[in-house]
Structure formats: C-alpha cells, structure tokens
Amino acid sequence: MAERIATEIAIIGGGLAGCSTALHLRQRNVPVVLLERAACGSQASGVNYGGVRQQGRTLVELPIARRSRALWGRMAELVGSDCEFMATGHLKLARNETEMDVLETYAREAAGWGLELQLLGRNALRDRFPWAGDKVIGGSFCTDDGQANPRLVTPAFARRARALGADIREHTTVTAVERGSDGFRIETAAGLEVRARIVVNVAGAWGHEIAAQFGEHVPEEPISPNMCVTEPLPYFLTPNLGVVGADLYMRQIPRGNVIFGGGRGVNDAKAQRARPLPESALASFQRALEVAPNLRGAHIIRFWTGIEGYMPDELPILDRSATTPGLIHAFGFSGHGFQLGPAVGAIVTEMALDGAPSTPIEPFRIGRFASAPSKS
Amino acid sequence: MVAERLPPVIVGAGPAGTRAAETLVHAGLRPIVIDEAPSNGGQIYRRQPSGFTRPGKALYGFEASRAAALFGAFDRLAGSIDHRPNTLVWSIRPGSIGAGLMHLVSSERANALPFDQVIFATGATDRVIPLPGWTLPGVFTLGGAQVALKYQGCAIGQRTAFVGTGPLLYLVAYQYAKAGAKVAAVLDTAPLSAKLRALPGLSANAQATARGLYYLFWLRSRGVPVQLGIHPLAIEGRDGVTAIAWRDPHGGSHATPCDAVAMGYGLRSETQLADLAEVPFAWDALHRQWLPTRDAAGRTPVAGIYLAGDGGGALGADAAELAGERVALALLQDRGAADNGRSHADRIAAINRRLDRYLRFRRGLERAFPFPAHLAGDLADETLLCRCEGITAGEVRRAVREFGAHEINRAKAFSRVGMGRCQGRMCGPAAAEIVAGALGVPIEQAGRLRAQAPVKPLPMAAVLDDAAASARHG
Ligand SMILES: Cc1cc2nc3c(=O)[nH]c(=O)nc-3n(C[C@H](O)[C@H](O)[C@H](O)COP(=O)(O)OP(=O)(O)OC[C@H]3O[C@@H](n4cnc5c(N)ncnc54)[C@H](O)[C@@H]3O)c2cc1C
C-alpha cells in the first residue's frame, strides 16, 4: 500500500537550498519532510565550481551573501565538517582599462553594503601574485571570500538535518502538488503521498515547473556552465580567481588540481542530462593561459557541467507565492546559489515560521517578471 | 543532389581496426583510421619504432606470422585509407540530429571531425587488483611489461616476478624468459582444479590451449617456479621492488626476491568513447564489467556507432580480427553499400560460427583463470586503491558506510576514487568490488563509473585547428 505521511513543512528539492532549509527548520524542531528526485546534492549543488564569493554579486544580493558568508565560517560547527571551505580570498582581474573601471566602480558601491575590497594596480598585483600574465592590468581582492568542495557540502547538510530528525526521502520524484482546504497534498512517483501545511519549492532549475502548477509562470532557463580540471600541479594559486565579464573563473585546491570554468555546455533539463562542450573547454584553455601562463604544459583530466536555473536578471526568486498561501519559492540562483545556499535555508525558515525574514528579500519577488516580461 | 556521405571512421588500428579498414577498402570506401600509436598493430602486435630491427619471431613468438599478416594487410592499405597516427580521440558526441562530432588531438593541435559512422576498436587494458606496494617503481601491468619488451626492446627488471591470472600471465613470462630476462616466479591466483574443470570449454580453441600449456611446461622445464592457487600478500621494498610476498594454498608464506613485478588479472575493455557516445551499457557477467550493448555484428543501439574487438568484451586478438571484418560488413549493410549480398551472407555466417567458438573458449578461460574478486573486495583498509588521487580502500568504504554513498559515482564524489588522471580505468574494477562489499550487494548493483571527456589527459596548450577542420569538410 502506498505510504502516506503528514508533516508541517514539505521541501521539494534536495539541493543546498533545500538541505539547508531542512537543517534550519530542524534546529527549531519543526517537523519536516524533504523530497529529492535523485540523491541530495546530485544536481547543481554537488557539481558546481565551488566558488564561495561575494565580490561581484549584484549589490542587492549582498545582504544574503554576507549572511551566508558568516555561516560558511561556522561550517564545521553547523554540519560537522568544514567541507574543505577555505577563506582564500577572491581576486577579480581586469584585462583592460574598461574592465579596471568596472572594478573601481564596484568597489566603491560595495563598500556602502559593507563589503571591503582592495584595488590592486599592475605592480601591486604582480608583487602579490607573481604568476599573473601580461594581459592582467589590475585587480580587486576580497579577503573574506573563498572556496569549498561542492561534492561534500550538500550531503553534509542532509546528514546533519537527518540526524536532527528531518525525514529526507531521496530517489523520490514529486509528480504533483496541490493545495486543498486543509493544506497541501504532494504526490510522488514512488507512491508516497505527503500532506503539509507549508511547501517550500527549492527545485533548482526545475523550480519553475513546480511554480507553474500554481499558475506562476517565470522565465527560468536551464544553463550549463562548462568546467575543466587539470592534473595536480605545484600549488601556486591561493585565491579563488575571476575576471570582469565572468568568462573565466579558476581556483586551485591544495592537492594541486586547478579547476576552472568558462563558456557553456549543453543540457536536456527535462531528462536531467547535461554535457560539457569541448569547444567551450578549448576556448577557456586560452583564456586561462592568458591570466596564468604557467599553466602551459598542464594537462586537463576531466570536463563536467551541471544544470543551473538562470533568471533573465540573474537574481533568484526568493518569495512567497503570489497565488497560493503557504507556498514559498527559492530557486533560480543564476550561478550564485552555492555561496548563497546556507543563508537561503535560514531565510526560508524565517519566512515559514516568523513572517518577515531578517534579511531583505524585496528584490527577489516572483511577480517581477509579470509586469516586465523578459525579452528572451 | 545526393548528399555525400562522410567517410566511415575507425578508432583503433589493432587487429579489429585493421581488418575493419581492410573490409571497408575492399568495398570501395576510404575510411579514416585513427590511433594514438605511431603505427598499427594495437597492444598485442605493437610495432617497434623504425630503426629497431628485431625479427618478428623474437618479438611475437607463435604469433609472428599473424603479426606479419596484419602488418602486411595494413601496409597494403596505405594510400587507400586516411591514416591518422599519433592521434587521440578525446571526445565524441553522437549525431542525434545530423552528423556527430569527434574531437581529436595530435601533439598540440586539436581538430573537430564530423562523422556519421564510427567503429570503436579501442581494445582493452589489464584489469588490476591493487595490493600493498603496487605503486613502487618497478611494478607494471602485464601489458605494460609486454610493451616495454616489444616496443622498446627492454625488460622491466633483472628478475621479474609475474603475478595475477589469465593467459597473458604465462605468455608474457614466456616472452621475458625467451628474450633472456630472468623470471623469478609465475604466481597464479587460479588453482589447478579450476584449470582442470575448464578443459572441456577450452577445447573450443585447442590450438590456443596447447600454446598455453606449452608456455607453462616450457617455463617449468627451465626451472621457473610456477605456483598455482596463490594469494598475493604484498610487494616489498622501499625505493624499489625487493620481493613479492605470497601465500600458498596450504597457508605457507613465501617471499620471492625480485626487482620488478608484472601483474594483471585478465583484461578490461576500454569503453569510454562508447559511453560518451551515449551507448547504453549492460552488465556482462562473463567479463564482470559493464559493457556497451551491441548486437552480434557489433552495432550499438545508437545509430552510426559500432564496436569491434576487445573494446566490446575481451575475446583476444584472433577473435578481434574476425569481429573487425564482421562489424565492417554490418556498417556497409547499414550504409546500403553491401549489394553483393549473397557472398556477404555466407561470410557473415562463417564469421559468426567462428566467433561463437571464441566466446565458448573465453568462457572456458574464465573457468580456468577465474577473476579473484575477493582479493579486491577484501583489500585492507590502509591499502592504496586509487593511485592517481591517493585514495585507500578504507576511504572508499567510509564513503559508503559513513557518508551513505549508494553506488560508485557517489563514492567517487565523496572520496575522489577514480577521479584522477586515469578516470578509474586502473582502480575502477577493484573500487566497484569494494563498494559492492561495503554495501553488501552483488557487484552489478554497485553501478558504473561514468566517463567524462577528455578520455585521456589533454594538453591545455591544445588549440582548435578550425582552419584545418573546415578545409577538410567544407
Ligand atoms: C557547473 C556549475 C558551476 C557553478 N558554480 C557556482 C559557484 O562557483 N558559486 C556559486 O555560488 N554557485 C555556483 N553555481 C550555482 C549553484 O550550484 C546553484 O545555484 C545552487 O547549487 C542551486 O542550489 P539549489 O538547491 O537551488 O538547486 P539544485 O542543487 O539543482 O537542487 C535542486 C534539487 O531539486 C530536485 N528536484 C527538481 N525537481 C524535483 C521534483 N519534481 N521532485 C523531487 N526533486 C526535484 C533536483 O533533483 C535537485 O537535486 C554553479 C552551478 C553549476 C551548474
């Protein structure tokens, strides 16, 4: 016979946003069931680049990013493992004057949001980072940023949430959600039926599918950032690296492998499949060699990619449903959700239990596309 | 206007690839033949560099005439094929709509090659079971030891011990002894009883069986210790190999002094390209490996993708030659280029009968030289399993038991096993046994390591040679 459970809050999606939500809810002893189609952290949250950066985020996103950064610093206490998080700093490079202007403007504006950045000219940058190629003319350094191992983070949140009593169901696909007079009823492919007072839609690149079941149509697009990793090399690159224009991001782990991304792969989001593209990879090799010429001679041992939900304005949806009371949306993190994930769980918990969250979420309303439909 | 078809592509110029190319050329096509090596021959008949002049008999023993025939066949194709030696196919995507695309690299030039039919004749490499000390300098796979001898004309040590199981164990030991190298011992994990039980199946290839027995008696008659039913314990030494420790079937411990070890437990098909081409895989109990699905002719369910030879289950070189011809005939048929139907039908039936015999023989071999899966499953926690990433057997068990990995890719995500340079081609089979053991499930439920491009390390200096690609196909 099909299993039925009743709970207070049901979470759809076991990515970092979902698992962090489960953990934060359990810290407050709220009954919670999390439903994940595959394994927790097997989509974007587990295969991303591993960048934990605030620098360069759209300014309105900085309050969430700041809050999340504080949680990253307490990872071991929070989930029982530091998940290889290291506050190595994030260095954003300029390759021409226009790019340097962008960095200067951003540094000025971000200071108003509490994010301190150090601007480095050509010589100062070379003194500190002697590997930088001739093309690099300057940069902006955020001491506070860093990197972590995405393969470990979400499963660690899930394990801790489970240890605190969350009912986490992996390999359980939600097929339908509806709201009746007595709350939500969720059907799954596995036959399990869940009833809940509140539903949290953290289904990542598939968040729009759940939203659509409640008449909320959002222009979320599945995008696959192309990733490469080299064989282990002598450790030379401490900070997490980016460039203006974001066509290259690169970091090295102490084991020696250099991980970098740039360009896009392809995906079939409906089938949950994605492939890196060799053409994108080859182009990113050239950009990586420009900023770090000492990589010439290195070999790439693997490409990969994942599926990430992008919004036209590259800001997530973090809001209550405009049509259905008790439904909370948090998806479409547009390439930023790994850093944001820990705080998203804390914020969604406040939205579910306290009314207003302590971090402003006004810019992330679900209705913002209805009045100004996207061009694409 | 009739759209011109792209020439068929063959990846791998070993026995299967060579015969496939020959068959396609006879049908009037001009296939592209790609191989990482500078010339044809594959692993078994690897040709020595030009300037080396050792006679074929010394290099290939009983197989000398087969090797000579294969080289002759390939050399006669010169001018009729588009041969691309020293070239690695590092990525492929199937042509779900329109032509598929393959990515090649040769020194530092990358090329994109559109295709609509491709035969993977990518062969196999040794199946390895780690043991303490297996990463010491001086430890090679059987295949590696054989390449050193055939290609470079040198032995891997002064006194080499051979450990593992399978026909290659005896063949390579024999080749070493024959070349004048000292063989310290041949240590076979398969017991004598297994070999006796296997005899009926082995009769499917009496000649090969006779050859195997000949190697065994030849080695013994020269005073080489050949031990059956052993349990390898460790390779000893600090900076290099000094001995191999093993236990006999009665429980006695031994240490055989040696300065090099060659090991292998049968073969493991190279299947990454088929994986990237999205060919579905199925568990194959005989090869104890996930293999790309294909019909008897070597057609996969993905249009335009074909398999031949050891790359689709290791049956050996002679079978690979037949499979190469067979798959080429299937490709021609699918291309609508096999109109002289009757003769092909006869030929196909004859090949099928012979391939059937090789399959029976292969089953016999598996009984004679059973894969000692328990050796992998029982590896001590502290033994290094994945040498690229430096991961021990215990770390993989921990990924399962403490972190809840429910299959091997998840264990890879948690522990990094199989994530390094070789992408698990070395440690994968043993890692799967360990995951299965830790989960307490049959091996086929431990899952299959997924392949990712590039199938082998790709130089970052590689530049896409657009001009060359468009000139050839524009
Ligand atoms: C290659 C790549 C690189 C990236 N790099 C970075 C980076 O460096 N820094 C950064 O901050 N961000 C990065 N990101 C973005 C970041 O990974 C994501 O924003 C974040 O992980 C999103 O988390 P999530 O929980 O919303 O989504 P996901 O991790 O995708 O989780 C959503 C989950 O919902 C499940 N699901 C969907 N539908 C259903 C259903 N019907 N029933 C049950 N379950 C369902 C899915 O299986 C999935 O596990 C990157 C993303 C990718 C793909």
Image (cartoon, grey):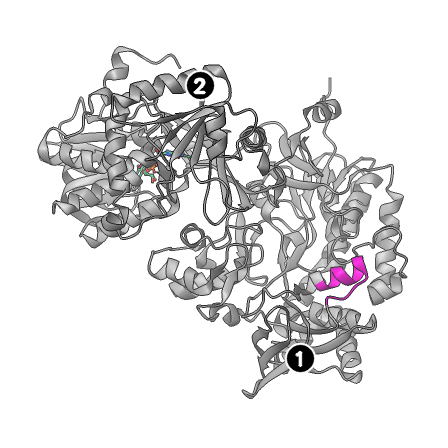
Q: CA distance from mark 2 to mark 1?
A: 65 Å
Q: Residues within 10 Å of mark 2 (few under 14, many from 20)?
A: many
- Name the residue nearer the viewer: B67 or B399: B399
- Name the residue nearer the viewer: B462 or A279: B462
Above or below, B141 relative to A90: below
Q: Quadrant of the C terminus of chain A?
A: top left
Q: Which residues are magenta?
A: B145-156
Q: Secondary structure at mark 1?
A: strand
Residue on which the image places disc 1: B257
Check disc 2 and give the amino acid type: Met
Q: Quadrant of residue B436?
A: bottom left
Horizontally, residue A157 falls left or right of residue B184, namely left
Residue on which the image places disc 2: A100
What chain does mark 1 sit on? B
Horizontally, residue B208 falls left or right of residue A353, namely right
- The tally of labels here is 2
